[in-house]
Image (spheres, helix red, strand yellow):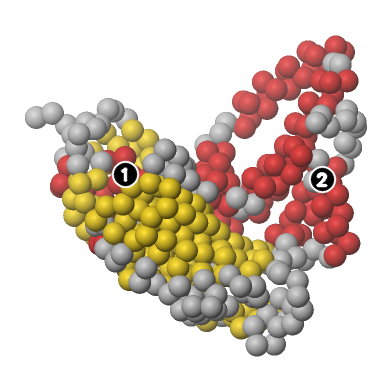
Amino acid sequence: MTEPTTDWGDLPYRTATLLLKQHQGAITTAELQELNTLVDAPARQRLLAELNDFPALEARLQRLARFNSAAAWQQVNDKRIHAHHKRSPRQRFYWAAAAMLTGIAAIAWFLSSRQIENNHARLVPDDRFGHQNDVLPGTSRATLTLSNGQTVQLRGEDFLLEEKDGTRLRSDSGALQYNTLAASGSETLYNTLRVPLAGTYRIVLPDGTAVWLNAASELRFPVRFTGSQRIVSLRGEGYFEVAADAQKPFSVQVEGDTINVLGTAFNISAYQSGRTATTLVSGKVAIAARKGRKALTPGQQAVSTTTALQVSPADMEKATAWKNGYFYFSNESIAEVMQQLTRWYGITVVYESAIDSRMRIGGSISREASLGEVLEQLRLLSGLQFNISGSELKVAAAKKK
């Protein structure tokens, strides 16, 4: 369905203003209804969904930070002036859409300013490893979206909030906990916890289930488990310690698969599109995957893809190292190692020369280490050359002797 051709006027800027209020938690009920109306069209709904996908947005903002906006705008402006007298109604719509995108991009940039500032705060002088600077590791931080669209930045400080059904949300020592004793009503309310790059966060769900979320991950869950099942949705990576309740099974939905449990501990990694790895630490889980069903016993891992479901003995230390506070590289390719560093340090990796794809890395190091410390270990293991400049990491092949 095509959106009508119209003069959008101040719509992008009004939308941007309302989005800012929503993310600040200052939006009124009337303004929220107005925002929902403004973003009702499918194309704008997609933009709003992308704006709320914080891991993807952060990656885009990092690219935007390196964008030569002055040169690009001059090029666009030259074309605009040249085509001014020949623009059709359809072209006018495209320019309106461009204005909308500009407004959304501007607000996205503004909303992320605290995130960017935090990233800059993690850039510190390097007086040990010869880089332009070093990068501090990630921290406990996340964004919580309440059922009314209000967002709360979680950065370790204590606070107390209340959902509209009376459920109480409390942050205590960097962990989010839910208390439903005073809650009432039949409406199912959902919250979403998003952890950005260079972040991690722990949450205790209303039933007592504890979940650790890794960087660039998202968990959607009801503020009360009122039905016959406990169902949550995951993107990215999470470690679950599920509170036992034989009368109310617990399920995690991820990438088209469902992991069903009663009371157990397991890790789910679904960073790679179309691939989910579930590793069982204790208890028992049943995987209802796109390509079959399997039950796991402790020490096993199920890998589900769009073409197969395979179960094999798990490398338990590798699967849970991130939750326990360290990197564990076991026969990893350089690309796999860099993916972990990208998520935990919030960096961009650039390969300056071809790297031997057969090279494998093994070893462990604390996630509390700075990026420079990790790279020094990798340099000794691999002979590769590394250079940190701001939040960009350049990787080059070993120098020939």
Question: At label 1, which amino acid type do we have?
Answer: Glu
Q: Earlier in the sequence, mark 2 or mark 1?
A: 2
Residue ranking furthest to the bottom: 181
**Residue tagged 2:** 40
Q: What kind of residue is marked 2?
A: Asp
Decide: is 339 above or below 245. above
| Residue 378 falls left or right of residue 47 | left
- Residue found at x 88% / y 20%: 89
**Quadrant the C terminus occupies:** top left
Asked if residue 257 can be seen in this view, the reply is yes
Element under disc 2: loop
Packing grade of label 2 (10 A; few <14, some 14-19, many >=20) is: few
Question: Relative to 257, is 96 on the left or the right?
Answer: right
The total number of labels drawn is 2
* Closest to the observer, 205 or 95: 205
> Disc 1 designates what residue?
336
Residue for point 78% across, 26% down: 94
Q: Residues within 10 Å of mark 1 (few under 14, many from 20)?
A: some
**Which residue is rendered at x = 26% and y = 63% of the image?**
299
